[in-house]
Amino acid sequence: MAFNILVADDSETMRAVVMKVVTMSGVPVNQFFQAANGKEALEVLDNEWVDVILSDINMPEMTGMEFLRHLKQSEVHKNIPVILITTEASQARIDEAKALGVAGYVKKPFLPETIKKMLDEVLSKAYDPETSGKDQWQAKEEGEADEALDF
Amino acid sequence: MDDKMRQMVVGITSQVFETMFFTFLEPMAGLPANGPGATDGIYIRSMVSLKANGSGEVILYLPSPLARDLTLNFLGLEDLAVTPQQVVDTAKETVNMVAGGLLGVLDPEGRCILGIPEAQELESLREESRLEDRQRICGFASQIGPVFVFVSLKPDFAD
């Protein structure tokens, strides 16, 4: 199975680095989606299914933590695993992220192996098509398509 | 900045450069006699603010050719493919990592918030008044030229 992966970071360069590391790690990727902040990430999720999210915290407009709170309130998206990749290294911030249900936390600067290990862990144990919300998302999409046809 | 703080800045900066860019910096025993501001060449200045009860800022001064090399290493690009925006982005990301590393030690309770980093090219360091404040600067030698890190934290920082 190849995965759809959303990378959220306000730095285009960092997004490119993260995508490169993921590609080099051998994780099968169907498609990458990108967002420059949490708001854009939510817009991506409105239109596309993603299997895992790699997100920064410190972003303008909507931070990674705010994005995470929105995500966890969504019945459809709450089970998508989120890995935070961030410079924010205080224990309090890590604890806050854990409380919000993040699947993993990678501190910048990072080694490529750290991202690979984290992705392997998350995708092997956390990804379950039954509970991921993908079925709900597909049903919602099909419903919207039917409504469009009816119109 | 006291010795303990200086060691922390040196350690964190070195770790960021080695881990992300495979680049080794040599901490300077002392700053250039004429002052860092007298260093020739075009520099990229990247800075990020820290906000809590107190406040502060971390500023990184990178020789422009070094910033370009770091970007090439970071993205694994050929020399001709790198854009000025990517160089600026890399400088911002670098200072963000240095500041984040400092906060991880100085502010374990996470009361401080990092600002959004900014960066710009400077034709010269001569107008940089902050570089006259030698107590707040750590210098590093690199293969391409000196790198300076300016750290200013108000006394009540993270109280």
Image: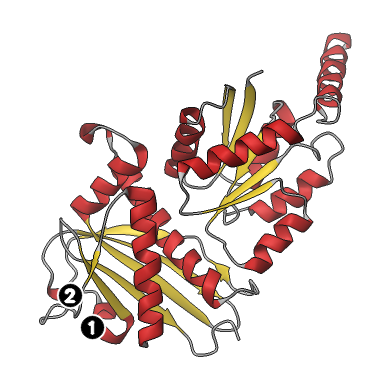
In the image: residue B145, left or right of residue A58: left
Is disc 2 in contact with disc 1, using a CB cutoff of under 8 Å?
yes
Helix or strand or loop: what does disc 1 sit on? helix
User: At which x and y percent is residue A6?
Assistant: 61, 34
State the residue position of label 1: B132
Q: Is residue A15 left or right of residue A54?
A: left
- Tell me which colouring the rendered structure shows: secondary structure
How far apart in space, not on screen, are marks 2 and 1 (Cα)?
7 Å
Q: Is residue A45 above or below residue B140?
A: above
| Amino acid tagged 1 | Glu
Q: Residue at x 81, y 40 (%)?
A: A78
Residue carrying label 2: B37
Q: Residue at coordinates 66% horizontally, 64% vertically from top-left? A: A93
Q: Chain of mark 1?
A: B
Estimate the x, y position of residue A12 in percent, counting from the top left. Answer: 45, 41
- Residue under mark 2: which chain is it in? B
Disc 2: CA contacts within 10 A as few (<14), some (14-19) or many (>=20)? some
Q: Is residue B54 left or right of residue B18?
A: right
